Image: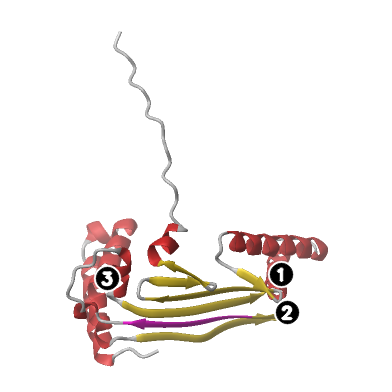
Amino acid sequence: GQIDGEAWHQFSQQYNAQTQALLAQPEIANNPELYQEKVTEAFFSALPLMLKGDPVITIAPLSWKNSQGESALNLSLFLKDPATTKEAPQTLAQEVDRSVKSLDAKLTIPVDMATEFMTQVAKLEGYQEDQAKKLAKQQVEGASAMGQMFRLTTLQDNTITTSLQYANGQITLNGQKMPLEDFVGMFAMPALNVPVVPAIPQQ
């Protein structure tokens, strides 16, 4: 990808300075949860510096292979400087659009390749060859079926595939268009309706 050298330098300088300052504070450095929270804050406060040059991040492709095939991830992420947008965001899509121009990602996993990988994992766990193959087949078929049920993956030519595009508040997931809010809603957990415990009446 391409990231402006000066913008990256400013980002890393500010981020490193802030994280070093955190380590100098024992009450933060000795509390892993608080430290992680503060590091995340430092990252996001410095991020606009890196976005100044409208960076592009590309992965083309990230591949992983074994004797039964090759999985691949291709990704292009075009970012932009949020400071160029003057209006305050009113929706999630507007918030994302401040920093993201577009995203294009595709993941392909051949079923045979995934089954071979899971077979090796099962053998490492102590299963015999026949048992390992059977278990691996069940696991891969189960994961594929679940992915299709949640519309996250498709199965074509014995290959599990996910394609995701984003631009201007619209997601295209495996060819199906939807607003960003609908896509996020696919992963939102429904609120648990916990019954209110009635107060015990005073005697």
Look at the picture and state if 201 lies above or below 181: above
Report which residue position mark 3 lands on.
Answer: 44
Which label's residue is closer to the chain start, 2 or 3? Answer: 3
What is the spatial separation of the Cα atoms under label 2 and label 3, in whole angstroms?
41 Å
**Amino acid at the residue labelled 1:** Thr
**Residue 68: mark:** 2
Which residue reaches farthest right?
130
Verify CB contact (< 8 Å) between mark 1 and mark 2: yes
Q: Nearer the viewer, residue 175 or 12?
A: 175
Which label's residue is closer to the chain start, 1 or 3? Answer: 3
What is the spatial separation of the Cα atoms under label 1 and label 3, in whole angstroms?
39 Å
Numbered disc total: 3
Look at the picture and state if 176 lies above or below 131: below
**Residue 115: mark:** 1
| Secondary structure that dominates the magenta span | strand
87 relative position to 75: left or right: left
Which label's residue is closer to the chain start, 1 or 2? Answer: 2
Residue at the (44%, 67%) spot, across then down:
178
87 relative position to 8: left or right: left
Callout 2: SS = loop
User: Where does the magenta region start and end?
Assistant: 71-79
Mark yes or no: residue 80 visible.
yes
Q: Where's residue 17, x and y in %?
A: 21, 76
